[in-house]
Amino acid sequence: MIKKIILAACLLPVLSFANIKDNNEINPKEKITNNRAKDSQERISKTVIIKTKKFKIKIDKQPNGNYLYQSWGANTKISAKPSMIISDGDVIPDGSGGNYYFEFNNNGTLYQVWRNYLTSSSKKAPYTLVVIDGNGETLVRQDAQVVKN
């Protein structure tokens, strides 16, 4: 019995030190947030090709981590020269459900390509192209289907 008490007295401080948190360790809630951000980044394809009624759009992840936007007329082959190229795009998460959008700035006009994972309708297109002018007015809003993902 005395051996058990001595053993417990010796192990108690050792086990207590095992639970001490290192000051450099990330808060568990931050770990969850970081994992969600990482998971959503993992779901974003390096190349996405979509088609609206008027445009074909190809979005590529560049080696610097930014995205490249290229667009053609809807009936033009992607092997042709793009009618528009915008570099230095970003991915912006939208909520915690996995939705996000790519945003590109072309001389004050914003081109956004929204990824619609969570929608109120199963018939909602997987992507939406939104073009916003410098005054904040929406010029284009077109649903898009995936051509290549």
Image (spheres, grey):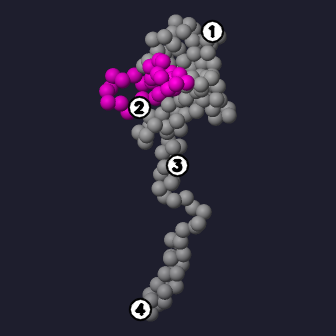
Q: Which residue is mark 3?
A: 34
At horizontal 51% and vertical 53% (from top left) the residue drawn is 31
Q: Which residue is mark 2?
A: 117
Q: Upstream in the sequence, badge 1 or badge 2?
A: 1
Q: Is residue 90 left or right of residue 114?
A: right
- What is the secondary structure assignment of the residue under circle 4? loop
What amino acid is at disc 2?
Tyr
Pair 3/4: label in front: 3
Q: Residues within 10 Å of mark 4 (few under 14, many from 20)?
A: few
Q: Is residue 104 left or right of residue 125?
A: right
CA distance for labels 3 and 1: 40 Å
CA distance for labels 3 and 4: 49 Å
Q: Which residue is mark 1?
A: 80
For the residues bearing labels 4 and 2, Cβ distance under 8 angstroms: no
CA distance for labels 4 and 2: 62 Å
CA distance for labels 1 and 2: 30 Å
Q: Which residue is mark 4?
A: 1
Q: Is residue 122 above or below residue 72?
A: below
What amino acid is at disc 3?
Asn
Q: Which region shows up in magenta?
A: 112-141
